Amino acid sequence: MKFLHKGKRHHMNNRKGGMLVLVLMIFAVSLILISSAMTITLSSRSRYYVDTERSQERLTLTSAAEAVIDAIKTQEITDERLEYMSGNTTSKYMITGASGTSVKDGANAVDGKSIAPGLTGSEQSYTYMTVRPAEDGTQDIILKFSTLINVTNQDGKAENLEVRMKWEDPGDVPPLCANMVTCGDETSSDVVDIQRLYVETDKSYTVFHGNTYITKAGETKIYNKTVITGPSTGGNGTIYYNDVIFYGPKAGVNIQSNGNGFWIQGDGDFYFLGVTVDGNSNIQNAFVDNNGNGKELGNGTNINMRSHNRNNGGAYFYRSKISIPNQTFTDSDTKYLVSGTGASVSRTTQYDGVSNIIVKDGGSVNNKSVSTKVYESGAVTGTDLQVYNRLHNKATSYINDANLKAAASRTVPTSTQMTKDYGSYATGTTFINQKSGNFTLPAGEKYEMSGTYSDGSLTIDLGSATGNTSIYISGNVTFDAFHIKVSNDSDNRLIIVMAKGTNFTMGAIKCWDNKITGILSCDKRNSTNWTNAYSAPLEATSGQKPACVIVGLGSNTFKAVQASVVDAYISLAGKGSEASTVIFNNGPHFYGRWEAAKYLYEGGDPSRMSFCPGMDEEDGSEKPLKSKYTADSYRFFYE
């Protein structure tokens, strides 16, 4: 029994020991599980923090990229600035605006931007951008954005985003029509007849090259400065309201034709300036023949030269020689003559009843007229001094004026040059088959026209594209109660290119059907009544820039008839046998500038030209800026 009892107690002791071991094992397992759970929790929390940092990096990175791309799109960051930045590939452009903070610092309402991760500009939290050209030889630009947020000190890699900004050729048009009017052919002795031309602005220049006749019939009125670079005949009825400048060795009054001189009705004078042109430094002859060779004016020939409201008008001669008999430059027409540096002024008739005043201003004077007085420049007094000062000061200004030199140097483009610049518009075109009715075409494309388009309109929204829109005139085109309408509220243009030898005609209107013929490329007009062919086409408001450019590649004719509307810069290339012609018939509503070797008037009212800014001038109107770059592709990566 004792044996049994003793065994029972031993068994109970074993059970207690087993329980202890079990408890210890459970405790150990619990510790392991708790430790594992804590480890997992800590690891998960770390991964969470790192993932959160990366998520914040992506958010900050993409937000910064979107802000920069939008700034480029709206030109807050201009294309010029972007291109400058791409040339500085080692520069980092920090995107900041926040101060650094640590996690333990917490955040208060006054912290503001200091809690913006990735924008603090610290070593552990930053966003920056680099700019470089694309490596494939294109004009594209690569924007690289880098953001690092490493508050936990567990992930030192920055997230990066590369954005390729694709360059799209806006089709910039070289500045044409530098002057309000450029006409004539300096390579030909053929006479260009300028008739019924009204340039009703005192801004810019009207420039005549080659052998011109202004005008043989009707009236021509020019209110801005007239620059003449070749032999020119002044016809009866021509009236100037500003200075007439004979510019260069080949310029002069053509006394071989039957014109009766040049009359300046406004406050203008004559300036004979023998300045060097294209390396030609010969002395200018004020009187020339058809070929520009110096010619003496015979005693039996009169050339009326009337200036500056007559009694106080004058003429200034610089490196120019002139021999004056009889009634040319009479005291009642042009009283004052000034012989400037390198000039020679001669009065050849002794008894002519002329009482001119000649001032020696560095040049020579040979005076045989007993009634004409000659002064040294320092001896002029009173009213005579005021007139002399005016002539001397303006002549000095013109001789050194870079704008005048540029205006005189602008000649009609050659066919070869224009084809080189614009011949590409002849390829890749889509033919416009619809020739009547009202329709719209997408902007930014290349189109083609040929034939007659009537009873309708074509509208193109130029502002909806990055670059220009073009129309290639591959064969003769006539608009018969048809018009193209575009807007000038953007910098994009409609470029119409006429193939060599083609004609473009703003043809017969149908006013009885309230149809409009022509090209409308100005939004502001002095009439908004588009229901009547006579009231709608009234001139565009002076000072805007037309959105249309019409270019001829040579041997072209552009014609606009009565009541048609043409808002455009017109530049028709060609000289000699390839010369082109602008024709205005009976006063079309033309607003813009034009240049061509020939000008033809066909009757009726004159063509009236109000001021139009040059293509490279500001017109004072606000237009939305548009970038040449668009975001084309994206690439994210870590490094």
Image (cartoon, grey):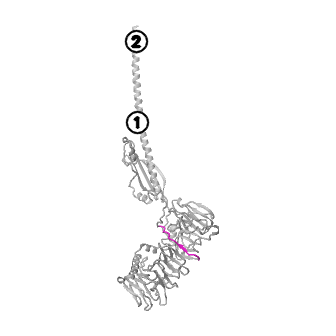
Residue 548 covered by magenta stretch: no
Viewer-nearest residue: 169 or 73: 73
Residue 26 is left or right of residue 495, and the answer is left
Dot 2 amino acid type? Gly
Q: Tell me the magenta residue range.
A: 603-616
Q: Is residue 149 left or right of residue 449?
A: left
Q: Residue at x 39, y 21 (%)?
A: 20
The residue lying furthest to the left in this view is 378
The vertical placement of 476 against 4, above or below, is below
The residue to which callout 2 is attached is 7
Amino acid type at mark 1: Leu
Residue 441, compared with residue 588, is above or below; it is above
Q: Position of residue 249 (x, y in %)?
A: 44, 80
Query: Label for residue 42?
Result: 1
- Residue 157 in sight: no
Residue 401 placement (x, y as % from top left): 41, 74
